[in-house]
Amino acid sequence: MKLYRLSLKLMVIVAICAVLRPGPVGAAETPAPGRAMAQQATKERPLWITADHTKHLILQQEFNSGPQVTPACLSCHSEAAAQFHQTIHWTWLDPATAESHVLGKGGLSINNF
Amino acid sequence: MEGNPMVNIYLYSRYERFWHWLQATLIIILLLTGFELHGTFALFGFRSAVGTHNFVGLTWLILFAFFVFWLFTTGEFKQYIPTTRKMLAVVRYYGYGIFRGEAHPVPKRREAKHNPLQRLVYLSLAALLLPIQMVSGFLYWGYNSWPEWGLTWLSLPVVAFIHTAGAFAILSFLVVHLYMITTGHTIAAHTRAMITGWEEVREGTEIEEWEQKERKTPQPVG
Amino acid sequence: MNIQSNEARCTSCHAGYGWKGKDFDFTDPTRVDCLVCHEQTGTYKKFPAGAGNPAPETMVFKGNGKTYHPPEWNKVAQSVGRPTRRNCGTCHFFGGGGDGVKHGDLDSSLIKPNKMLDVHMGTDGQNFDCVRCHSTTLHNIAGRVYTTPASEHRKSLIEDDLASKITCESCHSSTPHKEDAKANDHTDKVACQSCHIPAFARVNPTKMWWDWSTAGKKKDGKPYTEKDELGKPKYTTKKGSFIWSKNVQPEYFWFNGSIEHMTVRDTIDPSLPVAINQPVGDMDDPNSRIFPFKVHRGKLPYDKVNKNLAILHLFPKGKEDKAAYWKGYDWNKAIAYGMEYAGLKYSGEYDFIETSYVFPSTHMVAPREKVVACAECHTRSDGRLAKLTGMYLPSRDRFGMLDTIGWVAVLGSLAGVLLHGLTRMFTSNDRKRG
C-alpha cells in the first residue's frame, strides 16, 4: 500500500513537471538568456538615430534602378548630392589639380596594377 | 731596503675601497651593456640593455659627484696631482727593472699612494676621460631634450663618436689595470689591499708612525 | 593602368550610376549612388561590367563566372545608415581587380577581423568602422588625397576636440607610451605605424608583383589561369604574371603625408625602374617621419619613343572591339586606342619597363604585444631600416675607423700585458736565484 501511494505521488510530480517545463508551451515565460541575445543580435536592429527609414513612404514606392532611388533620398537629404559632387569619390580627380584634369583615376594618373 | 721585514700599512679607507669596487662594477656593467648597444654582441637584449645602461649611467654620474666631493673635503685630491719627478724611473722599472727583481723606485705611502705614472693615468681618468664619458653619455641620453636645453648645434653622430671613443679608451685601461694590479709584492697583494685596506710594504720605506694603525686582529708580518 | 577607355568595367567601383565613357554627366544629382555606401542589407552588389549599375536582371559575369542579381530596391533603400566596414570595403578591399590586390593593409579579412589583425576594428574589441577615424563632414572623407596629406597638424582631441580623428595622435596623443618613456622619444621621427604594423596582409595575401609583359599566352588557343601555393593566380592570359605574399614586412621611407604621383604625360627614364609614385619627405623635414609602405612592383608597357607610360585599352566596348587587349591580345592596338581616347600621342613603338608604386600601411594595427621589437631596427645588419641611410641610428651605425682603432688599442693592450706577464714569469726564476 505504501509503495503504491509513493509511486502515485511520483507520477503526479512528473506530470506537473511535464506540463510546466520551459518550451513553446511557456511562450509568455522568460526565454533562456542565450536565446534572447541571439534574437537581439540577428533579428532586431537597435535604432540609434532619429529616423526609421522603413517607415518613410517615399522609400516604399516601386524602384527599378539606382537613378530612381537617388531622387527619393534627395527629397529629404536635399544637399547630399551637391556635397558629394564636390568630392573625389564622385569626380575621381584630385581637387588640388582638378582644373588641369590631370591627377586622379578619372584623369591621367597611372598605377602599375 | 731589501731584506727588511714586511709591515702592513693602512692605505685605503673604507669609502675609498667602497667607491673603487662600486665604480668598477658600474663601469663593467656599462661596458657590457654599452658594447651590446654598439652592436658588438647580443646579451641582454637591446631593450634591456638600453634600460640598464641608462639607469647605471645616471647612477654613476650622481655617485661620481659624491666622489669628487670626498676628494676635495678629505684632501685626497692631492694624491692625483701629477708630477714628472721620478717619472722616468717608474717607466724604466715597469719596462725593464721589474724583470730583474728591482725594488719599486716609488714605494707606496699613505700620503702618496700613487706613483707618478699612476698619478698621471688616474688624473686623466678622473678629470678627463670619465667626465667626458659621463657628459657625452648624459647628452646621448637626453637627445630628445637638446632643443629644450638650447643645444640645437649638437649633432648625434659627434656625441656618439666621443662616447664610443671613450668606451674603447676605458676598456683598454681596464685591460691594463687588471694586469698592473698584479705587479705588487705578490700577485694578489694590491687586490688584497683594495679589499682590506692594508698593504704590505718593506719596513723602513719612509712610513710615518701614524700610518701604522692598530689592527683589530694581529696579522703575521713578513 | 588607367580607366580611360575602360570605364564600363572600372566604374563598378564608382559611387555613381552609368559612367560608361566621356559623356557621363557629372552634374546630374540622380546619378549619385547613395546605396553603395549607406545600405546595410549587405545584398547590394554592382555588376562588374555595369558602369556602376547593379545587374538589371539576374546575369552571369563571364570574368569570374559569378551570378549577379538585381537588388531588392525597397529593402535596400530602407536599410540606409552610417557606412560600415562592409560598405567601404566593397570597393576599397577589392581595388586593382581582386581581394587584397592593391593596398596590402585593406582586404576582406577586415570585414570581420579580430583584435590580432586590427586592434581598432576587431569585432572582439571596439569594432571601429572606417568612418570612426576617417572623419567625414559634408561627405568629405578625411584621408590623404594624392599630394594633400591626411592632416596638416597632428593634434590630439584634448588640444582641439574638433580636430579630425584621422591621425593616431588625435586619440592617442604624441606621447602615448606610459611605461616606456624612450618610446615616447621616438614619436617625432618614427610614425606610430612603423612600430605597430609589423607586417601587412597578415590574413589574406596581397599582390607584390604584376608583370604585364608575360600576358597574352594561351593554352589550346584559350586564355588560362595558373594558381600558386596560396591558391592565388600566378599567371592569367589577360593580365600576366603575379607574385602574392602574406605577412609582408613593409619598406620604410621618410614621409610627411604627401605622395607625389606621375601621370601618363610625364617623361620617364627607361634606363631605370620607374617610381610611379614616391613618398615625399626627408630626415631634415620636421614634418617627416619614418613610415611603413607596401611597394608594389611590376612591368608596364611604355612608349619607347616618347618615353612615357601608356594608357591601355583593356576592356572591350563591344563584341567586335578587337583593339581591346582582353579581346585581341595585341599591345600595339590596345595602347594606340587608349592613348588616342585620352587625346595623347603614341609613337607606335612600345616596350616594357619595371615600375614601383607605394601604398602607406596604416591599417591592420597589431596589439601592443606584437609591437616591432627595438632590435629589429637597432641592429647592425638586415634591420628593417637597413635601406634608410643618411641619419645616425644607434646600434646600426658606427664609425668604421673608430672601431678599428679602438679594437686595436684594446687587443694591443691585451697582447702587451700578456707579453709583460709572461716575461715576468720567465724571469722570476732568475730573480729568485739572484
Image (cartoon, rainbow, N blue to C red):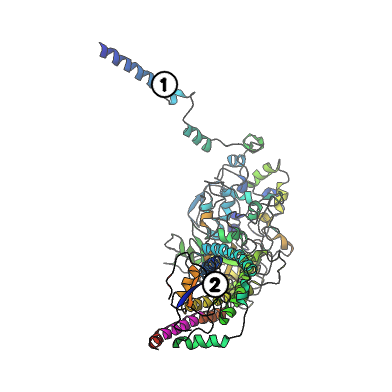
Q: Are marks 1 and 2 on the same chain?
A: no
In the rendered image, which quarter is residue C174 located in?
bottom right
Q: Is C72 placed left or right of A49 in the picture?
A: left
Q: Which residue sits furthest front?
A: B209
Q: Which mark is residue A20?
A: 1
Query: Is residue C415 highlighted in magenta?
Result: yes
The percent position of residue C393, horizontal first and vertical second, equals 59, 70
Quadrant occupied by the C terminus of chain A = bottom right
- Is residue C69 in view? yes
From this view, report whether residue B38 is shown above or below residue C417.
above
**Identity of the amino acid at label 1?**
Leu
Subunit bearing disc 2: B
Q: Is residue A112 visible?
A: no
Query: Could you tell me which chain the residue with mark 1 belongs to?
Result: A
Look at label 2 and name its amino acid: Glu
Disc 2 crowd, CA 10 A, few/some/many (<14, 14-19, 20+): some
Depth order, front residue of C351/C258: C258
List the residue tagged with mark 2. B211
Question: x, y percentage for residue C69?
Answer: 53, 47
- The N terminus of chain A: image quadrant: top left
